[in-house]
């Protein structure tokens, strides 16, 4: 026969073994593995506070919630400087709502899962957070923190923040929806901040914003960014965008130093802008330039309904431009290019009319 400790070598989170205080319902102060045996509801303050290293907390499919009339406290609070933390499998729920104009207010928690700073070797997985006045899952960037397969909805601040974010979704966020160093297979939707903000790489991501950039990354691969702001950029890649799509109502649809196999669209701004090279790209704009490459455009197409030009590049090779009654292609050197509609302004032409 096995003992209970051998069968379930974990500690149940309850008032007897995790004594709290007036602002902390349950405090985990000893390293080990812990689990919930039922739902937890607090009337104010923090539900669970972890103050020691080496803790695994399994919510076991249960919900942590707060009935505080004005959102305050945290669902799970991690003290600063902790390491070796794992949290998984459950729900953190508040009563905060968005009034439709980007004002978040209501009952429950300020933060869903929050670390003050300097968290190391932390992994959060399969946690769902909703209805918090500030952030959903906030672990900070620039350290060994991972958020995987998590969801956040309706929070007034940052949706998810960690060094590495994978296969996660944050929507209806007041600030940056997804904020990490490396972000993959994730979706972020924001009212005022960036949809997705990756300081290093974004891969297979979708970002949208009502008031700012849809997706921002140093390098973006297989990503989609959309902004409906007059000043917002659909997708901004600091160095390289590959196989990406960007759309904006009033600014650049897609902006990058180098763009490959990309599509950019804008109502009144430039559809696609490349500071050095655009290869096999398409840029579309109604009242701005379709595609603008400061250096070289190769195998590209630019379309403008009524803007300055369909396509602009210092050096254009095997490109096409469209602008009814206006400038289809403008280039210093063009080789094998043609105007679908409109006229060209080219200083040196090769292999073309």
Image: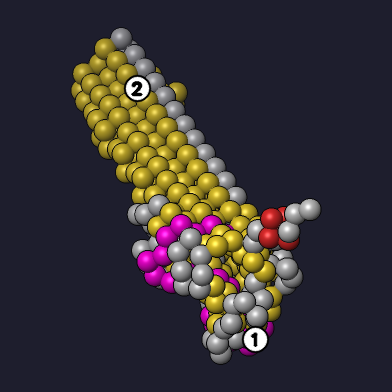
Q: Identify the coloring.
A: secondary structure
Q: Is residue 86 magenta?
A: yes
Q: Residue at x 34, y 29 (%)?
A: 278
Q: Is residue 65 visible?
A: no
Location of residue 143 by image quarter: bottom left
Q: Is residue 283 above or below residue 126?
A: above
The residue labelled by disc 1 is 43
How many numbered dots are placed on residues in this image? 2
Q: Residue at x 64, y 62 (%)?
A: 10
Location of residue 75 by image quarter: bottom right
Q: Is residue 25 magenta?
A: no
Q: Viewed as shown, does residue 326 lie left or right of 172? A: left
Q: Residue at x 59, y 82 (%)?
A: 19
Percent coordinates x, y for residue 217 in the rendering: 38, 46
Q: In the rendered structure, find residue 298 and report the number of the disc placed on it.
A: 2
Q: Nearer the viewer, mark 2 or mark 1?
A: 1
Q: Is residue 259 visible?
A: yes
Q: Is residue 230 above or below residue 109?
A: above
Q: Earlier in the sequence, mark 2 or mark 1?
A: 1
Percent coordinates x, y for residue 187 in the rendering: 55, 50
Q: Viewed as shown, does residue 15 lie left or right of 240? A: right
How packed mark 1 is, by other alpha carbons closer than 10 Å (few <14, some 14-19, many 20 or more), is some
Q: Which residues lie in the magenta part? A: 65-87
């Amino acid at each position: 026969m096995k003992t209970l400790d051998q069968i379930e070598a974990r500690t149940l989170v309850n008032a007897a073994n995790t004594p709290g205080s007036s602002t902390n319902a349950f405090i985990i102060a000893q390293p080990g593995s812990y689990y919930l045996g039922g739902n937890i509801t607090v009337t104010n303050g923090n539900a669970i506070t972890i103050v020691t290293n080496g803790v695994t907390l399994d919510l076991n499919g249960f919900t942590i919630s707060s009935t505080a009339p004005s959102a305050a406290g945290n669902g799970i609070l991690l003290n600063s400087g902790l390491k070796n933390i794992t949290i998984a499998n459950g729900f953190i729920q508040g009563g905060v709502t968005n009034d439709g104009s980007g004002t978040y207010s209501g009952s429950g928690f300020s933060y869903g899962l929050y670390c003050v700073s300097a968290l190391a070797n932390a992994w959060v997985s399969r946690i769902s957070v909703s209805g918090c006045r500030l952030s959903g899952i906030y672990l900070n960037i620039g350290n060994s923190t991972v958020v995987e397969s998590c969801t956040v909805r309706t929070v007034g601040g940052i949706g998810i923040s960690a060094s590495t974010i994978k296969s996660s979704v944050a929507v209806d966020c007041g600030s940056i929806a997804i904020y990490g160093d490396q972000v993959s297979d994730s979706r972020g939707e924001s009212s005022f901040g960036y949809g997705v903000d990756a300081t290093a790489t974004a891969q297979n991501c979708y970002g949208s914003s009502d008031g700012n950039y849809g997706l921002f990354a140093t390098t973006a691969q297989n990503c989609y960014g959309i902004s409906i702001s007059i000043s917002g950029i659909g997708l901004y890649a600091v160095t390289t965008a590959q196989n990406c799509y960007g759309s904006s109502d009033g600014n650049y649809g897609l902006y990058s130093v180098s763009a490959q196999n990309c599509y950019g669209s804008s109502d009144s701004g430039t559809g696609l802008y490349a500071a050095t090279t655009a290869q096999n790209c398409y840029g579309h704009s109604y009242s701005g330039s379709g595609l603008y490459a400061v250096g070289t455009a190769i195998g590209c197409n630019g379309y403008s309904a009524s803007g300055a030009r369909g396509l602009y590049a210092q050096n254009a090779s095997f490109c096409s431009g469209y602008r009814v009654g206006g400038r289809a292609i403008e280039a210093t050197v063009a080789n094998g290019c043609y105007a679908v509609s409109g006229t060209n302004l080219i200083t040196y032409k090769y292999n073309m009319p």
